[in-house]
Image: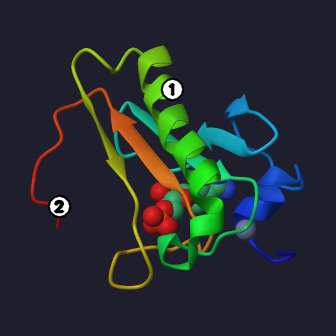
Amino acid sequence: MSDCLFCKIVAKEIPAQIVYEDDDLLAFKDINPQAPVHLLVIPKEHIASLAEATPAQAGLLGKLVLRVKLLAQEQGLAEDGYRVVVNCRDLGGQTVPHLHFHLLGGRFMTWPPG
Ligand code: AMP
Ligand code: ZN
């Protein structure tokens, strides 16, 4: 998707602080962090939101979730705990229409969210 912000980060047309990359996935620091650790983990393939995900993408989505887990370990979050957030479409608070998992940690996360 040529005018998608996160596709441009995947294409290295826009800079980001990348912390992990493989053939299918990219993880980078959120530009407006809401916790001491705030990463975004995305599929390189453009999927507009979780609502657009299909069974054909089950393998990719499984890889993504397990990568979030490994990044949490690498960031030193696993023992104390962390939060993973996926905002979906307008009422979910999604502002960038390219599927992304927020990995948040390093502070106590309150519930419920606003
Ligand atoms: P969401 O509201 O769930 O769609 O989350 C979008 C996230 O992308 C927000 O937390 C933003 O701070 C973050 N964001 C927006 N632009 C950039 C950027 N250029 N680099 C890194 N993170 C960004
Ligand atoms: Zn995209």
Mark 2 or mark 1, whichever is nearer to me: 1
- Seen at 56% across and 78% down, the residue is 52
Up/down of 54 relative to 105, above or below: below
Up/down of 9 relative to 48, above or below: above
Name the foreground residue: 47 vs 89: 47
Q: Position of residue 7 (x, y in %)?
A: 78, 62
For the question of whether residue 99 can be seen, the reply is yes
Q: Position of residue 48 (x, y in %)?
A: 62, 75
For the question of whether residue 40 can be seen, the reply is no
- Seen at 43% across and 18% down, the residue is 73
Q: Which residue is mark 2?
A: 113
Ligand 1 contact, mark 1 (Cβ < 8 Å): no
Q: Position of residue 62 (x, y in %)?
A: 53, 46
Under mark 2, the amino acid is Pro
Determine whether label 2 and label 1 are within 8 Å by CB: no
Q: Residue furthest bottom?
A: 90
Q: Which residue is mark 1?
A: 71
Which of the marked residues, 2 or 1, is nearer the chain's N terminus? 1
Q: Secondary structure at mark 2?
A: loop
